[in-house]
Amino acid sequence: MLRQEARLSFLVCWLICPGRLAAQAPAEPYQPVATMKQLMVEIIHPASNEILLVINRGGPDAEREWAAVRRSAMTLAESGNLLIMRNRAPAWVNEAKKLIDVGAAAYQAAQSKDSKALAVLADPLDASCTACHKQFRPSIFPPPR
């Protein structure tokens, strides 16, 4: 009887073992829709430009401008996540994480309506785009001769 209970316990454990369940789960719960070019042209470029334009104009003034910066900052931060989705661009993970970081920092600055903190992010925002483009779009930034 004890032997039969041990077998039954082993069978139950084997059937519900977390590793076994994970192996049966679907690989990804999401489905990429946009191409990399669409992400860049339709989402990332406009969001980064909006933030940089506001900074270059002296920072947001009215609540409407702060709200626009918050939206653009959150868009950039979440776009970094889109860039590192599986089957998207695994080699871009480090650069995408920089985009996430600068987007999150810009969101925090906009949330607290801190123009100085936002202005400090102009160079890191530009650098996150430029570093990625230099590495992955050499036609935009050809190497020096």
Image: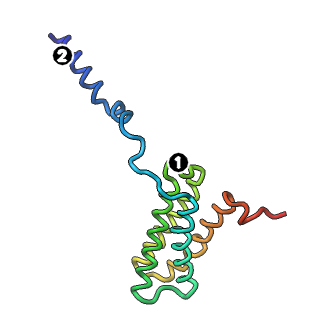
Residue closest to the far left:
1
Q: Amino acid at mark 1?
A: Asn
Few, some or many residues within 10 Å of mark 1 (<14, 14–19, 20+) = few
Q: Name which quarter of the figure residue 98 lies in.
A: bottom right
Few, some or many residues within 10 Å of mark 2 (<14, 14–19, 20+) = few
- The residue under the point 43% across, 74% down is 71
Q: Is residue 117 left or right of residue 14?
A: right
Q: CA distance from mark 2 to mark 1?
A: 46 Å
- The residue under the point 54% across, 88% down is 58
Which numbered marker is on residue 87? 1
Q: Quadrant of the N terminus?
A: top left
- The residue under the point 58% across, 59% down is 95
Q: Which residue is mark 2?
A: 5
Colour setup of the view: rainbow
Q: Amino acid at mark 2?
A: Glu
Mark 2 vs mark 1: which is more N-terminal?
2
Establish if 35 lies above or below 67: above
Q: Secondary structure at mark 2?
A: helix
Residue 119: x and y, percent? 54, 80
Residue 47: x and y, percent? 51, 73
Observer-side mark, 2 or 1, equals: 1
- The residue under the point 57% across, 76% down is 122
